[in-house]
Image (tube, rainbow, N blue to C red):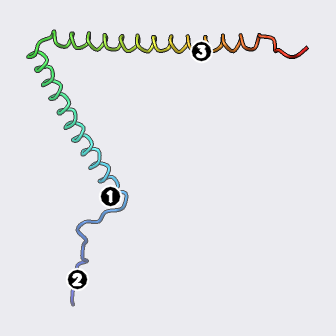
Amino acid sequence: MTSPAPPRRRWFRFSLRDLFWLVLVCAVLLGWWVDRKVLGRYFRDRVEAERQFIKEGFQRDFDSKRDLYEMQIKSWENKAELLSRESQKIAEELDQLRSSQSEPKRGSN
């Protein structure tokens, strides 16, 4: 008597659902790894910027902010001056229109 041949086994037998779980786990791990790299770079750059700030001195930052605020105020003052000029021109034009309309027309009885 001959014995039947043993059935051939497939080594890796996965369903589509198992494949989706594997992709999900890999995506979560990859996202976590990338997030850690980005955060590490952010904190490294921030520490370097603070070191540079301390090296150059604190006064420079306050001076630059004050200069920025002064420039902004000057810009607002210039805009306000332009607006006041424009409003004066418009007021003069309105006065001229009102005076020309209030004058009686000549030649009509």
Q: Mark 1 points at which residue?
A: 19
* N-terminal label among 3 and 1: 1
Amino acid type at circle 1 is Leu
Q: Are marks 3 and 2 in contact (CB under 8 Å)?
A: no
Amino acid type at circle 2 is Ala
Q: Position of residue 12 (x, y in %)?
A: 25, 66
- Please say if 29 is above or below 64: below
66 vs 14, nearest the viewer: 66
Mark 3 or 1: in front is: 3
Q: Position of residue 75 (x, y in %)?
A: 37, 15
Mark 2 or 1: in front is: 1
Q: In which quarter of the image is residue 105?
A: top right
Q: Mark 2 points at which residue?
A: 5
* N-terminal label among 2 and 1: 2
SS assignment at label 2: loop
* N-terminal label among 3 and 2: 2
Measure the alpha-carbon separation of dots 3 and 1.
74 Å
Q: Where is residue 85 in the image (x, y as percent from the top left)?
A: 50, 12
The reply, left or right, for residue 39 in relation to residue 74 is: left
The reply, left or right, for residue 98 in relation to residue 49 is: right
Measure the alpha-carbon separation of dots 3 and 2.
105 Å
| Residue 90: assigned label | 3
Mark 2 is surrounded, within 10 Å at the Cα level, by few (under 14), some (14 to 19) or many (20 or more) other residues, namely few
Quarter occupied by the N terminus? bottom left
69 vs 8, nearest the viewer: 69
Q: Residue at x 32, y 58 (%)?
A: 19
| Residue furthest right in the image | 109
